[in-house]
Amino acid sequence: MGEYHIRGMNPLRGKISPGGSKNAVLPILAAAVLNGGKSVIFGCPDISDTHIALKILRALGCKADFNDGVITVDSEDLKCTTVPQEYIKKMRSSIIFMGSLLGRAGAAVVSHPGGCDLGERAIDYHIKALLKMGAVIREDAGILHCRADGLTGQHIIFDTPSVGATENVMLAAVLAKGETVVTNAAREPEIVDLQNFLLGMGAKVAGAGTERIVINGVTKLRDTQHTVIPDRIVAGTFLTAAAITGGEITLTNVVPEHIYPIYTRLAEAGCTVKEEEDRIHLRAPKRLVSIDSLTTLPHPGFPTDMHQPFTSMLSIAKGSCIIKETLFDARNKHIPELRRMGAEILTLSSCSSYIVRGVKTLSGATVEAKDLRGGAALILAGLAAHGKTVVKESHHIERGYERIEQSLASLGADIELKPSESEEITQPS
């Protein structure tokens, strides 16, 4: 574990690319189990979640190599269908191996997922859908033992869109008998990227990006190559970092359509935003103005992963904003840390809604990252604060940002990643 040491008040300037998408590469790696052959995946982010997914693949008997952003998976020799519990506890999205293992091998053993503690995130949708497709699932002390003597296509209807459940059904249905229809499916760009990867394998999938996805099962898949889409949340974080510091940056290698819900709100806050084919240019004003309200919604609404960085930005904007988090009930652990830095944030009775009253400046402090996006929010606050900020527990942030300190430093930020004090003390002499 480490900690970020930041001295603020430096406007960010320059060009930067967000790299490959965390939320796209993880289900794609789970899908690499399905073809029983080789998959070559380009543009993969070098983050801790990626490495956990690779460890899972190796534990299952697959060969998996990662070199300079390229992952090569050979899943021919699948020896095991148990996903080690230690990895699931570290990364919630590893639950989607349940669908790919059932589809490929007819068996899967997984535990209830972990990852960032963002409140109650039940996997009922995953289980109900797989049961309907013919799986038999037994739970024992938090471990799910899943078996299927051949899955069959079904009509799956979600009450509300679920990214993970949509992905799990897609993975399970690719090799199932007959047609599977997912109604009220999640529409995120990462779902479309998963579909494109599966199509490259020879799967028959259509409709990703809409509320209705149709999968017709096939009996065999082939080797494939694929390039992961750019990370829209990292891109949004960089844009917000430029906004909070009064800077001016150009994002390259992005899909502007994916970031539209983010940069339109930045424009409302006073930023000048110019969109081109594969890049976005943002110039921030001397002081941001607040927006009236911000509500997180499934795509194409404002992404939940960006609400915490926006909280930091709005904490120094002129005016007040009501933020409503509708997807996760405990995505508020960054608030006490921001208050340490001088932010004025009033939590409402629901605890998932609060009022951010902009102050003129924040002050550097020692704060602790409690989760991935909350940690990124604290880094952004440090970039805009007077004095020195130390953000502890860097491992949360390293789950989703590839050497964020180097990326921000390339834009002019004064930021370093250092070992924590406890690590320094225990280093051998």
Image (spheres, grey):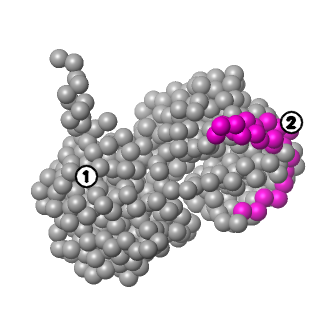
Task: Check disc 2: other Cα within 10 Å, few if <14, some if 14-19, many if 20+.
Answer: few
Which label number is shown at residue 149? Answer: 2
Residue 306 can be seen, yes or no = yes
Task: Check if residue 293 falls in the magenta segment.
Answer: no
Could you tell me residue 388's position as x and y percent? 14, 52
Picture quadrant where residue 339 is located: bottom left
Q: CA distance from mark 2 to mark 1?
A: 51 Å
User: 293 left or right of 173?
Assistant: left
Q: Identify which residue, 225 or 246, lies in the foreground.
A: 246
Which residue is situated farthest in the top direction here? 429
User: 289 left or right of 219?
Assistant: left
User: 288 left or right of 147?
Assistant: left
Q: Which residues are magenta?
A: 135-158
Q: Identify which residue, 350 or 8, lies in the foreground.
A: 350
Question: Which amino acid does the dot numbered 1 rest on?
Answer: Val
Which label number is shown at residue 367? Answer: 1
Q: Nearer the viewer, mark 2 or mark 1?
A: 1
Secondary structure under tag 2 reads loop
Q: Identify which residue, 155 or 351, lies in the foreground.
A: 351
Q: Residue at x 44, y 68 (%)?
A: 351
